[in-house]
Image (cartoon, rainbow, N blue to C red):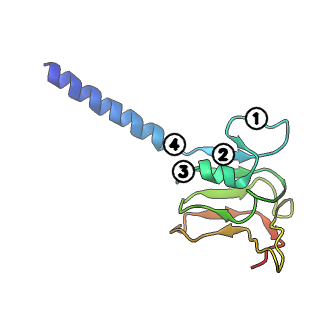
Amino acid sequence: MTGFKRTVTMIFGFTAILAVSAQAIVFRVDRSQSASTEQRFATIQSAIDAANPGDTVAVAIGTYSGPGNRDLDFHGKDIIVYSEGQPLLTIIDCGGSPSEHHGGFIFHSGETLEAIVEGFTIKNAYF
């Protein structure tokens, strides 16, 4: 009878792990002081790096520039990165030039059509 109890416990424990890992998380990019600190990131790339496939990165209205906010790499993850505002209000300023090449998003690691970017203005990209 003891062996049966162990098996049942292991099955329920495994089911609980699967249920927790199947929940998508929303990571927020917001540099304002009033934003909640739970799952909040200062740069878009840091939120992308923390996300797992199926998660979402919500970017607050504002202009994002410099390292961590340009040349954004999904690293093969099928995640959603979207602006919480209209594209004219959420801007990625790549700061690119003929001597310094920078762009917005880079998809080169096997991302699928489930890797989504929505609602941004991308400016000053240069390759």
The picture places residue 23, in percent across and down from the top left corner, at 51, 42
Looking at the rendered structure, the secondary structure element under dot 4 is: loop
Looking at the rendered structure, the secondary structure element under dot 1 is: loop
Q: Is residue 13 above or below residue 64?
A: above
Q: Amino acid at mark 3?
A: Asn
Tell me the residue that label 4 is attached to: 23
* Within-10-Å neighbours for mark 4: few <14, some 14–19, many 20+: few
- Disc nearest the viewer among 4 and 3: 3
* Within-10-Å neighbours for mark 1: few <14, some 14–19, many 20+: few
Of marks 3 and 2, which one's residue comes earlier in the chain?
2
Q: Amino acid at mark 1?
A: Ser
Q: Amino acid at mark 2?
A: Phe
- Disc number for residue 10: none
Of marks 4 and 3, which one's residue comes earlier in the chain?
4
Tell me the residue that label 2 is attached to: 27
Tell me the residue that label 1 is attached to: 36
Residue at x 78% of width, y 77% of height:
126
Of marks 2 and 1, which one's residue comes earlier in the chain?
2
Residue at x 32% of width, y 30% of height:
12
Of marks 1 and 4, which one's residue comes earlier in the chain?
4
- Disc nearest the viewer among 4 and 2: 2
Cα–Cα span, label 3 and label 1: 21 Å
Q: Is residue 74 left or right of residue 102?
A: left
* Within-10-Å neighbours for mark 2: few <14, some 14–19, many 20+: many
Residue at x 22% of width, y 24% of height:
6
Of marks 3 and 1, which one's residue comes earlier in the chain?
1
Q: Is residue 10 visible?
A: yes
Tell me the residue that label 3 is attached to: 52
* Within-10-Å neighbours for mark 3: few <14, some 14–19, many 20+: some
Cα–Cα span, label 1 and label 4: 20 Å
